[in-house]
């Protein structure tokens, strides 16, 4: 069933059927609304991957990430999830020079005066995941975009994903310049107990509207810059002629510094030939549902994530 679901998701997310997919997603959230966070995470993992997880005695990396998802409550996570507030954290860590330019911050869509903005801008919501849009004043249907962002203003992303760090975030909008994504490579560093254990390089990450592309290519590497011998069920690109940024060691160091307060997270950057831009801090990649096959790899990396090192003050429930 989960394999059929994945195929249907890819089909429905294309073109005019995307609206139907969004409606089904809303119905799914309502169907699961009475479940506890723990029950939701178990069922959601089963539905998305077919894998039955044990959150009472987590061993695999994915199990431990889900355990963190429903029991770890470090307030700093909220700061680092909000796309405005995280900039303050990055600056405090000494990396203000890596922050991308911001044209403006607004409380709602109607506050934006497009007449004084550049012809091309990148607009994103600060309190949810995946609500982004490139706007061209000469071709974009502004009223259609307004409906998207007005609707997003009402979303509490926690109810959809059960990611506590999104709960109660203030809805705002950021306007940024449009980047030429042909010049940037997306690097994502997975940090476990303060150490980068592996990282991803992603190509073709965005579509023409600035949203995550269904055609993106996702390669994983260890810190020796060798391909990670795992399958996460995502397409890969041919890296025969690929050259890593000469700043890779710096990125390891920066990622570990930014991730140091947390047991697990992913630190993202956009990297060009002459520039590094901070992207975001993600605590639960793919909602915590990314699974490495064979599962022995999940156990291997799960052993590196020591839940006993988490401060008791940040652990809730059971």
Image (cartoon, rainbow, N blue to C red):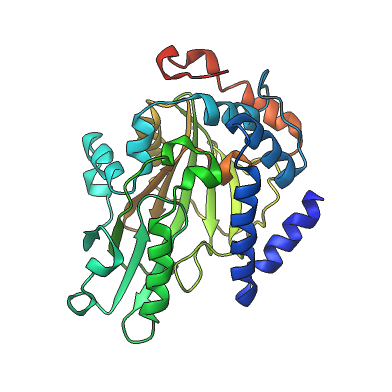
Quadrant (top left, top right, bottom left, bottom right) of the C terminus? top right
The total of numbered circles placed on residues is 0
Q: Nearer the viewer, residue 302 or 219?
A: 302
Q: Where in the figure is residue 68, as x and y percent of width and height?
A: 53, 27
Q: Nearer the viewer, residue 246 or 95?
A: 95
Furthest toward the left, the residue is 116
Q: Where in the figure is residue 34, as x and y percent of width and height?
A: 62, 38
Q: Is residue 239 at all visible to an observer of this figure?
A: no
Q: Is residue 12 at all visible to an observer of this figure?
A: yes
Residue 32 higher or lower than 186, as above or below: above
Q: Residue at x 42, y 19 (%)?
A: 314
In-image side of 252 versus 6 (left or right):
left
Residue 25 higher or lower than 246, as above or below: below
Q: Residue at x 33, y 87 (%)?
A: 138
In-image side of 198 versus 146 (left or right):
right
Q: Residue at x 75, y 61 (%)?
A: 7
Q: Residue at x 68, y 18 (%)?
A: 57
Q: Where in the figure is residue 65, as x and y percent of width and height?
A: 57, 30
Q: Nearer the viewer, residue 146 or 63?
A: 146
């Amino acid at each position: 069933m989960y394999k059929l679901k994945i195929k249907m998701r890819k089909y429905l997310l294309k073109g005019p059927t995307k609206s139907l997919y969004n409606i089904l997603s809303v119905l799914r959230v309502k169907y699961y609304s009475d479940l506890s966070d723990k029950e939701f995470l178990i069922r959601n993992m089963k539905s998305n991957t077919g894998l039955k997880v044990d959150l009472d005695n987590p061993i695999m990396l994915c199990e431990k990430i889900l355990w963190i998802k429903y029991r770890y409550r470090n307030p700093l996570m909220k700061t680092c999830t909000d796309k405005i507030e995280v900039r303050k954290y990055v600056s405090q860590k000494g990396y203000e020079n890596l922050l991308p330019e911001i044209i403006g911050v607004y409380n709602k869509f109607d506050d934006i005066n497009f007449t004084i903005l550049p012809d091309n801008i990148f607009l994103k919501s600060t309190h949810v995941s995946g609500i982004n849009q490139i706007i061209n004043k000469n071709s974009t249907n502004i009223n259609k975009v307004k409906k998207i962002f007005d609707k997003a203003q009402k979303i509490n992303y926690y109810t959809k994903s059960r990611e506590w760090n999104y709960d109660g975030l203030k809805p705002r909008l950021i306007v940024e310049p449009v980047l030429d994504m042909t010049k940037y490579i997306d690097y994502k560093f997975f940090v476990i107990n303060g150490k980068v254990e592996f990282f991803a390089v992603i190509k073709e990450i965005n579509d023409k509207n600035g949203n995550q592309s269904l055609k993106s290519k996702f390669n994983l590497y260890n810190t020796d810059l060798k391909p990670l011998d795992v399958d996460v069920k995502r397409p890969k690109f041919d890296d025969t002629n690929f050259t890593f940024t000469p700043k890779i060691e710096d990125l390891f160091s920066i990622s570990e510094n930014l991730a140091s307060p947390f047991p697990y997270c992913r630190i993202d950057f956009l990297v060009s030939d002459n520039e590094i831009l901070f992207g975001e801090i993600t605590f639960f990649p793919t909602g915590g549902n990314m699974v490495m096959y064979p599962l022995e790899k999940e156990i291997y990396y799960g052993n590196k994530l020591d839940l006993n090192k988490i401060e008791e003050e940040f652990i809730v429930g059971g």
